[in-house]
Amino acid sequence: MDWLIFATAFLAFFVTHGVPVRPPIKARIVNWTGRRGFTLGYSALSFVMLGMLIWAAGRAPFVALWPLAIWHKYLVLAGMFAVCMLPALSIARPNPFSFGGAKNHLFDPKRPGIIRWVRHPLLIAPALWAGLHLLPNGDVAHVILFGVFLGFALLGPRIIDRRRRREMGPGAWRALLQRTKTAPVWYRPHSIVDLGLRVLIGVVVWALLIMAHPGVIGVSPLP
């Protein structure tokens, strides 16, 4: 029965993720709630369904594949710092290469920020999250859970790259990408305050996740 609950949760997760973003359905929802309302509602639904899926994986029969090692937790703690920093440094900033960018017409390839190293930070973050959590969760249910998330997160950039090349034109896309990759590694940001605030937000989120993990997930992430 617990495996059935896990499978049902997986199905519900993908249905609630796939159906609302289908163009005809999304258009109706956006007309009703507005674009911002759709984004907020879809994000909230995603977090709720993810929580349900993690809960269902914890209820599934435990079938061990590899043991937990102490270095797993050290690596996850360090890697999760990067997971928190990626969205903190990219959300609400111009990014014509991926989704979620704000005011993409203001994107400056000479000052691309995190985009110089990571073209799709909002997709690489969940991929890194899933890959890291495979290590300390070496049982069948969690390997399925995090393995599927890792696969889909790594597939996303290819799909979006294809879409952006089509929208921008292959030549324009390649030219902008080349200019971005050859931007200076270090340069003075437009706003030191904005950069500092974003880094602070990333650190705070990372610390909150560590503190909340025992109560929400039931396991301490600390070694």
Image: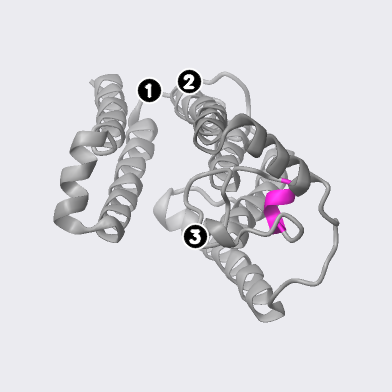
Residue 27 in percent (x, y) is at 21, 43
Residue behind mark 2: 140
In three-dimensional space, the C-alpha distance between marks 3 and 2, rounded to whole angstroms, equals 39 Å
Residue 204 in percent (x, y) is at 58, 69
In three-dimensional space, the C-alpha distance between marks 3 and 1, rounded to whole angstroms, equals 44 Å
Considering depth in this image, is 136 or 160 the residue closer to the camera?
A: 160
Residue at 72% from the left image edge and 78% from the top image edge: 192
Left or right of 113 on screen, residue 215: left
119 inside magenta stretch: no
The mark closer to the camera, 1 or 2, is 2
Q: Secondary structure at mark 3?
A: loop
The mark closer to the camera, 3 or 2, is 3
Secondary structure mostly seen in the magenta stretch? helix
Identify the amino acid type marked 2: Val
Q: Earlier in the sequence, mark 3 or mark 1?
A: 1
Residue at 25% from the left image edge and 30% from the top image edge: 15
Identify the amino acid type marked 1: Pro
**Labelled disc at residue 61:** 1
Residue behind mark 3: 102
Mark 1–mark 2 CB contact (< 8 Å) = yes
Q: How many C-alpha atoms fall within 10 Å of the one at disc 1: few (<14), some, or many (≥20)?
A: some
Q: Secondary structure at mark 1?
A: loop
Residue 82 in percent (x, y) is at 67, 52
